[in-house]
Amino acid sequence: MTKTAAGRGTLFAALLALCTGAYALGSDYGYDSFKTPDAVSWVQLCGTWGPNHQGTYRVVHVDQYAQSFLYVQWMARDANGSLHAAHTAAITELDNDHAEIALTDLSCRATPRGIVVTARATLGHDDKLRRVTIEAGPAPGQYRYLPQRTR
């Protein structure tokens, strides 16, 4: 094999690896990844949304892969009065298996514009303790992630 042919083979292998995501940092996990209830550690209904405040927010915390995954759902009632998720937002800053953030002491409170979820956060990358605040609403899928260093 010539140097040129070997070089092309190496280049092809590198391009193939990049195209297939072999070098991506972490994978995102959507809410559907956690259909088994054993991974769900905290569920809270909190606040209302919608034009007549008929909907409610639901926050779902999942412990998996030694870290936390958090989802906010905009729940609506169907014709029979049963709640179903009209929209689910994965908190992308947390819901990646490379984030290595573990949440504890979760709480949720209603606000005039939506909900505020707070938690203590421990990062797997360092020993710094932080707090995390997520403001969700009023529009489905709308949220703001606010990490805070505490020491």
Image: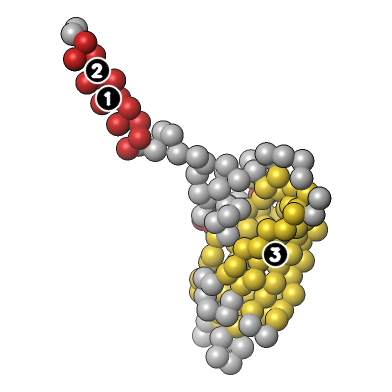
Relative to 23, is 16 on the left or the right?
left
**Quadrant location, the N terminus:** top left
Bin the neighbour count of mark 1 within 10 Å (Cα to Cα): few under 14, some 14-19, many 20 and up.
few
Residues at marks 1 and 2, CA–CA distance in whole angstroms = 6 Å
Residue 7 circle label = 2
Q: Which residue is mark 3?
A: 133
Bin the neighbour count of mark 2 within 10 Å (Cα to Cα): few under 14, some 14-19, many 20 and up.
few
Position of residue 104 measured from the top left corner of the image (x, y, whole percent): 77, 54
Q: Earlier in the sequence, mark 3 or mark 1?
A: 1
Residue type at the position of mark 3: Thr
For image coordinates 59% across by 76% down, the residue present is: 137
For image coordinates 53% across by 66% down, the residue present is: 88
Q: Which residue is mark 1?
A: 11
For image coordinates 57% across by 80% down, the residue present is: 138
Residue 101 circle label = none
Residues at marks 2 and 3, CA–CA distance in whole angstroms = 50 Å
User: Do the CB atoms of the residues marked 1 and 2 lie less than 8 Å apart?
Assistant: yes
